Amino acid sequence: MKAVLIKDNLPDFNGYAALYQMTPAHDGHEFVVASAANVPFSGPETYLFPAAADGEIKSFSELDGSYRGGLDHAQALSNAGYTIA
């Protein structure tokens, strides 16, 4: 399973966010935004969110692979079973 970087450094996010195209779709979502941020009082986290092809978040419910304790898109995608192609 692979994740292809489509758009890097998405605006309007705290931290670093990027859009990936997932093959096959992840939990029914072809596009996913990975967001890595240091959050006050809870620390570093990297979350995966379902997105549209333009990078707009469809829902702020975290997808499988999201985790706390690090700032690493590759790790979150790996947790979900994907490698960055």
Image: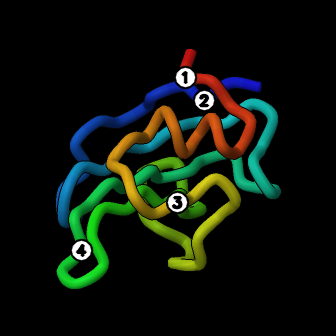
The spot of residue 4 in percent (x, y) is: 54, 25
The spot of residue 58 in percent (x, y) is: 55, 72
What amino acid is found at the position of numbered circle 4 in the picture? Answer: Val
Helix, strand or loop under label 2: strand
Instruction: Say if mark 3 contacts mark 2, CB within 8 Å.
Output: no
Instruction: Say if mark 1 contacts mark 2, CB within 8 Å.
Output: yes
Neighbour class for label 4 at 10 Å: few (<14), some, many (≥20)?
Answer: few
Q: Is residue 49 above or below residue 17?
A: below
C-alpha distance separating marks 3 and 2: 17 Å
C-alpha distance separating marks 1 and 2: 5 Å
Helix, strand or loop under label 3: strand
Q: Earlier in the sequence, mark 1 or mark 2?
A: 2
Quadrant of the frame with the N terminus: top right
Identify residue for label 4: 39
Helix, strand or loop under label 1: strand
Neighbour class for label 1 at 10 Å: few (<14), some, many (≥20)?
Answer: some
The number of numbered badges drawn on the structure is 4
Position of residue 14 in the picture relative to residue 27 (left or right): left
Neighbour class for label 3 at 10 Å: few (<14), some, many (≥20)?
Answer: some
Please name which of the two marks, 4 or 2, marks the residue nearer to the observer.
4
Identify residue for label 2: 3
Question: Which residue: 81% across, 56% down?
Answer: 28
Please name which of the two marks, 4 or 1, marks the residue nearer to the observer.
4
Identify the disc placed on residue 84: 1
Position of residue 64 in the picture relative to residue 19 (left or right): right
Pick whichever, 31 or 42, lies toward us.
Answer: 42
Identify residue for label 3: 67
